[in-house]
Image (tube, rainbow, N blue to C red):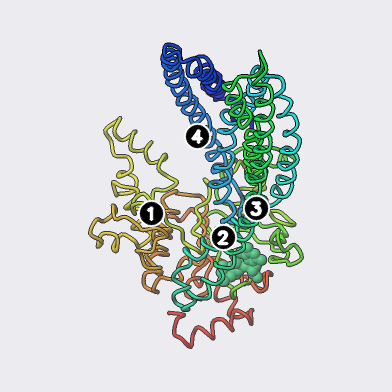
Amino acid sequence: MLKYLKKYWFYCLLAPLFMMGELSMDLLQPDMMATIVDDGVLASNMEVILTEGVRMVLLVVFGGTCGVLCGVFANIAAQEFGNDIRKALFSRIMDFSFEQTDRFTTGSLVTRITNDVTQVEQMVMMSVRSLVRCVLMFVGGIYMLYRQSPQFALVAACGLPFVTVIVVVTLKKVSPLYTVIQQKLDRVNSCMQENIAGARVVKAYVKEDYELEHFSGANDSLCDTNLQAQTILAFLNPSVNIILNLCVVGVLYVGGYTVRQDGGITPGQTMAAITYLSLILMRIVFFANIFQTFTRASASWRRIREVLDTPVVQTQVDESSGGVPAQADGQTGEIEFRDVSFAFPDAPENLVLDHISFRAKQGETIAIIGSTGSGKTSLVQLIPRFYDTTDGEVLVDGQNVRMYPMQMLRDKIGIVQQKTELFSRSIRENILWGSEEKYEEIAACAAADGTDNFSAVYGVPDPVSRAAGIAQAEEFILRTPDGYETQVTEGGHSLSGGQKQRISIARAVIKNPEILIFDDSGSALDLKTEAALYEALNREFADTTRIIVAQRIFSVKDADRILVLDNGRICASGTHEELLQSSDVYREICKSQLKKGEIGA
Ligand code: TTP
Ligand code: MG
């Protein structure tokens, strides 16, 4: 934690300094009050009352100013610190692999980056402000009490052990509950997240009440634990107050007993002593508060550390396999699977891919067909290394994908995933997303030498409209009122399934990658549009290796090679005609789709 605080050491130093200013004023006041009572009121000396009174007011103003400054600096330190941690967390979460995100759950990650950071922030705030104040006030209070009379200090010494025992017992009971509370908060957040994101499904199944109950369960459980903690804490203040009041009785007794003796304790001193006594004993309660904040924060910090300490598996280049590959000439977009087996890390016994071997040369179109759950998505996800293989090797341009720096590998690949994800920005930004820098460069070059190179090569002045054209998205985009500037709502809810798919295709195409992967990307397109898409791809991306995952024979029949995937195994491969001859599975798929007239020509 110090690593993150180091940057703000100056504020962490200033805050306690001003705190000391405020505190000294607080400690001096009861003493001055004693003077006013003893030398002013009892001696009927108006002058003392006035001068001491004015001094007190001035000190209060000075103390208040110090207090404000302390608060400001403590806040700067805590907020900036929290800000840094949130950024660090966010950046680490962005680097997570899919399985790492799955393991933490989205709800928990959201709690960690919001609530947990707030707890830790609070702790920093407390450390530089309340903790310092507490310690100094405790020590200073004892000193001032002793100054009034050593006998008073003795009374305080009798009360202290009792208060300490009460506080320690309470804390022992409460502390473990905080970890539980954070876990339960995770559950509430997960539940909320799922339901807000899945509101459409919940409504479609009229499951609001059921989900409400589910949510209430998680919420009640959180509430119970919170109540449990608060109930224990509720005993703290009254018990300490009892001890405090007993001590006050002690002070009054000592004061009353000696006040009549010559040179004994004065009434003013007795009054001051009572104030100091409550200052000292209440500090222990405050200590308990601070300790609670620390316990909560340390539970939170542990959870933050879990995220920050999670190693980024994905971006690590596997050094054992020989370091970063050099770009070999003439090898652009070759893919090879060498005896690849794969199981998801959370279910290692369940082989999703079973000894897959195939090779795709530059410019080839490989189609993968198979029933749902046969492992098509899993297979293509291994190419951009969303997951690592369990066994065997995936090679791109003759090099194992594990050897590439992530950016280099993923720059080669344009993948349209099965589940389209759009951002709540304009259509143009969604398409350009991931390729902005590249096109800013082109635009800058064009502006510099006055030639429109892009137009010269592609016949269209704008890469976005070229990509949209290839993806067959241009037509519907231009029909929207704002064209490319139309804002997409969160999750792309303002667009149809097919429209979203086409924008995702445009986003992959605009990268001009060596390898294009379409995971079921034609599924929401009508046959005419899909045919136009493949035609455009053949025209513009003849040299790009294409992998097309599909369920429909229509989408795969023109591919150079079709792999028929069945239960994680390639059960047949070849062209459409070859497979019609050789593969029963393929013929079955054809037959079932022919009935619906989908196979086309
Ligand atoms: P997929 O590879 O997703 O199957 P698919 O793409 O062929 O199916 P679809 O046509 O419906 O898109 O899944 C293969 C198997 O892997 C399936 O049995 C479910 C399992 N699986 C996991 O265990 N964990 C995961 O995270 C995913 C995505 C799949
Ligand atoms: Mg799939």
Question: Between tags 1 and 4, which lies in front?
Answer: 4
Q: Which residue carries the number 4 mark?
A: 79
Q: Do labels 3 and 2 touch, CB within 8 Å? A: no
Q: Quadrant of the C terminus?
A: bottom left
Q: Which of disc 2 and disc 4 is earlier in sequence?
A: 4
How far is mark 1 from mark 2, CA to CA? 26 Å
Residue 546 visible to the viewer? yes
Looking at numbered disc 4 in the image, what kind of residue is underneath it?
Gln
How far is mark 1 from mark 4, CA to CA? 28 Å
User: Is residue 279 depicted above or below 334 in this figure?
Assistant: above
Place of residue 119 in the rendered image (x, y in percent of width and height, measured from the top left): 58, 42
How far is mark 1 from mark 3, CA to CA? 41 Å
Looking at numbered disc 2 in the image, what kind of residue is underneath it?
Val
Mark 2, secondary structure of its residue: helix
**Closer to the camera, 403 or 315?**
315
Question: Between tags 1 and 3, which lies in front?
Answer: 3
Place of residue 122 in the rendered image (x, y in percent of width and height, measured from the top left): 56, 38
Q: Do labels 1 and 4 touch, CB within 8 Å? A: no
Question: Between tags 1 and 2, which lies in front?
Answer: 2
How far is mark 3 from mark 2, CA to CA? 18 Å
Q: Which residue corresponds to the image point at 56% horizontal and 81% vertical from the top-left?
A: 589
User: Is residue 335 depicted above or below 45 in this figure?
Assistant: below
Q: Which of disc 2 and disc 3 is earlier in sequence?
A: 2
Residue lying at the far bottom of the rendered structure? 595
Q: Which mark is residue 188?
A: 2
Label 1 packing within 10 angstroms: few (<14), some (14-19), many (20+): some
**Closer to the camera, 432 or 153?**
153
Place of residue 587 in the rendered image (x, y in percent of width and height, measured from the top left): 58, 82
Q: Is mark 3 within 8 Å of ligand 1?
A: no
Q: Which of disc 2 and disc 1 is earlier in sequence?
A: 2
Label 2 packing within 10 angstroms: few (<14), some (14-19), many (20+): many
Q: Which residue carries the number 3 mark?
A: 229
